[in-house]
Amino acid sequence: MTFVVTQDCIGCKHTDCVEVCPVDCFYEGENFLVINPDECIDCALCEPECPIDAIVADNMLSVEQMPLLAINAELSKVWPNLDEAKEPLPDAASWQAKPNKLSHLIR
């Protein structure tokens, strides 16, 4: 099992999760965070820290969310590692309630 950052993070990019990760398995893109599934130790510390519930266990992904497992794996190989918290994106509050944000992912 691993944890997955879902599309709810797109446009928000809260980093409370990064602060508690003991293995620094988060990677940062312009408008999204991902978890490297090979580095995640399944400790579950990040999940409750996300203020928008954008992190879920891979076995809890809905059918619609399944592509995000591959997206997290792919992008964690090319994006820089993030090992400390940052401020969320300036317009995070306006992005929080938007549905179907995957088309807004900046790779």
Image: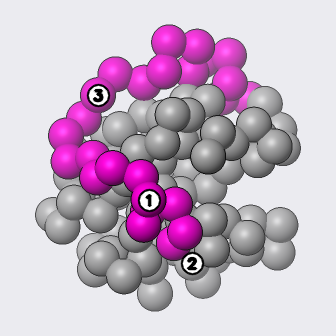
Q: Which residue is disc 2 drawn over?
A: 58
**SS under mark 1:** loop
Contact, CB < 8 Å: mark 3 with mark 2? Answer: no
Residue 26, given in percent of the width and then of the height, sits at: 34, 56
Q: CA distance from mark 3 to mark 2?
A: 25 Å
Nearest to the observer: residue 64 or residue 28? 28
Residue 78, given in percent of the width and then of the height, sits at: 44, 59
User: Is residue 49 visible in the rendered structure shown here?
Assistant: no
At 34% across and 22% down in the image, what residue appears? Answer: 87
Q: Which residue is disc 1 drawn over?
A: 78
**SS under mark 3:** loop
- Any mark on residue 19, and which? none
Residue 105, given in percent of the width and then of the height, sits at: 68, 42
Nearest to the observer: residue 36 or residue 2? 36
At 67% across and 49% down in the image, what residue appears? Answer: 7
Q: Residue furthest front?
A: 78
At 20% across and 48% down in the image, what residue appears? Answer: 83
